[in-house]
Image (cartoon, rainbow, N blue to C red):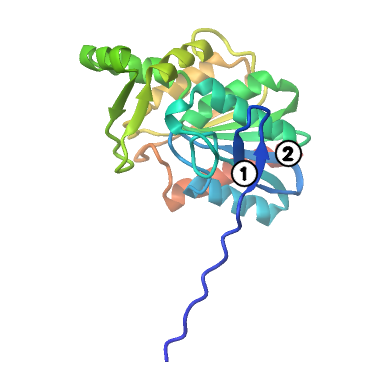
Amino acid sequence: MTEQTQQPEVPSPLYAEKPDGARLAYHKLDGLGPTIVFLGGFMSDMTGTKAMALEELARARGQAFLRLDYQGHGRSSGKFEDGSIGLWLSDALYLIDSVTEGPLVLVGSSMGGWIMLLTALQRPERIAGLVGIAPAPDFTEDLMWAGFSDEIRQTLERDGVYYEPSEYSDEPYTITMKLIEDGRNHLLMRETMPIATPVRLLHGMRDESVPYELSLKIADNVASEDVQIRFVKDGDHRLSTDRDIAILKDTVAALCDSAA
């Protein structure tokens, strides 16, 4: 008789209700500060490899930790196509304000890197450090709109939506004109960002979604002099190999140690 392996129980998320009625799903660990906050990417959720690896790190260190789903992502309420950078930023700020206290180390992946930088500007007194993983500030304007053909731009202006094939999922990216227009209200790379906290940037040089040169521009655009970039020559956009995850964990742990 074959013995069945018992699968570990996956805990249900907690929920917080925003004043606008949205229900935001999140997981948190109580522990020592600073609190590590993971901010995921476009059309991703809080169950990805990097989010779970950082929770494992936090648990092992006894560190406070938060991961979350923006509206229209994962287990949170809402439709993805109704979302925007401003809305998702407000989701992150609401949970940070509601369920965390003290200093924060924000970790932002791809679009989450944009949310991370915006959050740091909104809550400067709480930020102990930033870790960007292929961070993509201003991507709606500089990577999407700037790269779209006239035909795609006309589709967006006419229909309000364009479905872009994704190499990471069977589901296409839903790009709305609302997303593009709202993104223009949150552009960061046109002037110096008054961010004085330590910043660490991790970027794969074979990233076909967000050019690694963008991390160099971010380093130049923040006021902080304590900025380090680690390029992974054969790394892709996801930076999710065992080696990449080890680099991420080491980077976050070192920032937490220096902030403690």
User: What secondary structure is found at the residue carrying circle 2?
Assistant: helix
Q: Quadrant of the C terminus?
A: top right
Give the CA distance from mark 1 to mark 2: 10 Å
| Callouts 1 and 2 close, C-beta under 8 Å | yes
Q: Residues within 10 Å of mark 1 (few under 14, many from 20)?
A: many
Examine the rendering and report whether any part of residue 188 can be seen.
Answer: no
Q: Is residue 219 above or below residue 17?
A: above
Q: Which residue is identified by label 1?
A: 26
Residue shown at 62% from the left, 33% from the top = 106
Residue shown at 52% from the left, 75% from the top = 6
Between 259 and 99, the one lying in front of the other is: 99
Amino acid carrying label 1: it is: Tyr
Q: Is residue 138 above or below residue 15?
A: above
Q: What percent of the width, then of the height, locates residue 155?
A: 26, 16
Residue shown at 59% from the left, 40% from the top = 68
Q: What percent of the width, then of the height, locates residue 56?
A: 60, 54
Query: Which of pointers 1 and 2 lies earlier in the amino acid sequence?
Result: 1
Q: Residue 99: which numbered mark, if any?
A: 2
Q: Is residue 142 above or below residue 136?
A: above
Between 85 and 114, the one lying in front of the other is: 85
User: What secondary structure is found at the residue carrying circle 1?
Assistant: strand
Residue shown at 61% from the left, 30% from the top = 91
- Image quadrant where residue 180 sits: top left
Q: Taking 22 as reference, is 213 left or right?
A: left
Q: Residue furthest front?
A: 21
Q: Residue 221: which numbered mark, if any?
A: none
